[in-house]
Amino acid sequence: MTATSVEVVDGGQHEVVPPVGAPKVREPGPTLERALGWLLTVLGFYIGARTIRDNSFLTHLTTGDLIRFEGSVPTVDPYSRTASGEPWTVQSWLASLWYSVLADLGGGTAIRLGNGVLTGMLTHLAWRLSDRSPVLLLRFAVVGLVIMVGATTWTPRPLLFGLVGIALVMMVLQHRLDARWLVPVMWLWVNTHGSFPLAFVLIGAVAVGATIDDRRLPLGEMRVFGWALVGMLGGAINPLGTRLLTFPVELLSKSEALDGVAEWGTPEFDRTFERLFLAMVFGLIVAARARAPWRDLVPAVVFALAGFLAVRNIGVAVVVAVLALTPAWKPAMRTMTGHERGIVSKAIGVVAALGLVFSFVLTARTTDLALERYPVDQINWLEQQDLIAADDVNLIHRDVVGNYMHWRFGLDAHVFVDDRFDFYPQDVLDDHKDLIFGGDFNEILERRDAEVILWQSEGLFADWLRGSDDWRVVQEDDDWLVALPN
């Protein structure tokens, strides 16, 4: 006898029930969950592939070129006049080499596309980590929060490798990846950015939360910790040896040098991404009241506290908070789960594909480096006068100018200071800070044997130069000025 469909009558409504054993017929096209994941991933890619405006990137790129051409990683400072020959740990040497290789293959466009791949991967991992929640709109909102914060914090810096590392450790802790993957992940993390100790902070916080939840030893988390430790120790296999493993400790000991650096300062909540961080904190409070698992809450709280201590930690905090903000709750009412298929999911998939094409086209047609923040005209004039990039000329300038000079002049830069604040002698950083915020300008310039000054045209120091009998401003626009001795 052949099985046929049965028509069930219930309250005047007719539903055709397929016969037992009949194959399920799926509507073609992606599920809504998958289509939204594509859309968010493309948006993350676009953010990473935008025009490069980060100041530190110029030094990372120049250092990568130096590594490629010299065949070794520098161990002393090659760029400055005030710290020339001082020991320097290039803790992001592999990331710098990556930027240099990409630039050699396809210029700035290749670097931007490579950066977009990192941010797209980070977005994709965040979307996957959020899929424990059956509430699709909640997932979309949480990952959207991560992307909105990333719109400001996802710059082409080695920290991006650390953010991807955090997300991969979370995948391992959620049993989405085999723990043995942490061996290559941690090796890459150690050699691309000094934030790798955060992996152990994350694993430890999850272990504490799991102990509270399960009332037992967190054996699974201990195993993850072990594989991460193996990967970290293996990270010492590099051109710099164990210096990369001790670098984070050395950095923490230089808190005075980092004082006043914006990204190491506490947030003032006057910028959009800082206010979004507060929204994340509010979400954690709601999740705690709803009794989200401690294994999700404890790490989210730990990294949220770190976000209150330093602006640079906010980007990490929102990634770690994904699990706590999208727990495995059972929705109180029926809602979209993401398994739906139809015209909406197909339309979103098409938008995602078009968005990817648009991102590639825009990356190819727009400027790779935004140089409008730098005194390009003034540096051109100084170069014509042989008053810059010369060993016998003591040029005093802002830190951002130093990074631009690295990129433009390489080993001939001979800068006064740049944004490697953890590296310079403290007296150099103190003089630079006093020139910005006010100090004995004449005494600083005499002690530094200043011969040329390239500075911003607004501020106490610029006003002092205009009124000084010992200096004359020879070139000035709305942003920068050049001063020479009278």
Image: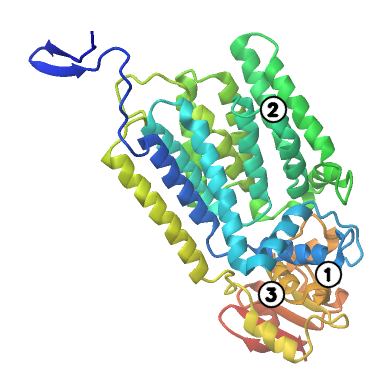
Q: Which residue is mark 1?
A: 80
Of callouts 1 and 3, which one flags the residue occurring earlier in the amino acid sequence? 1
Q: Amino acid at mark 2?
A: Ala
Foreground tag (2 vs 3): 2
How far across and down, in percent of the image, does residue 166 sit?
Answer: 64, 37
How far across and down, in percent of the image, does residue 383 sit?
Answer: 74, 87
Badge 3 crowding class, 10 Å Cα cut-off, few under 14, some 14 to 19, many 20 or more, is some
Q: Which residue is mark 3?
A: 461
Q: Is residue 84 left or right of residue 305?
A: right
Could you say which quadrant of the image residue 34 lies in? top left
Q: Secondary structure at mark 1?
A: loop
Foreground tag (2 vs 1): 2
Q: Which residue is mark 2?
A: 179
- Height in image: 484 above or below 193? below
Q: CA distance from mark 2 to mark 3?
A: 55 Å
Nearest the camera: 344 or 332? 344
Residue at 69%, 55% in the rendered image: 260
Residue at 65%, 64% in the rendered image: 55
Nearest the camera: 107 or 474? 107
Badge 1 crowding class, 10 Å Cα cut-off, few under 14, some 14 to 19, many 20 or more, is many
Q: Is residue 327 left or right of residue 458?
A: left
Q: Amino acid at mark 3?
A: Phe
How far across and down, in percent of the image, does residue 233 sit?
Answer: 84, 36
Badge 2 crowding class, 10 Å Cα cut-off, few under 14, some 14 to 19, many 20 or more, is many
Q: Is residue 53 left or right of residue 441?
A: left
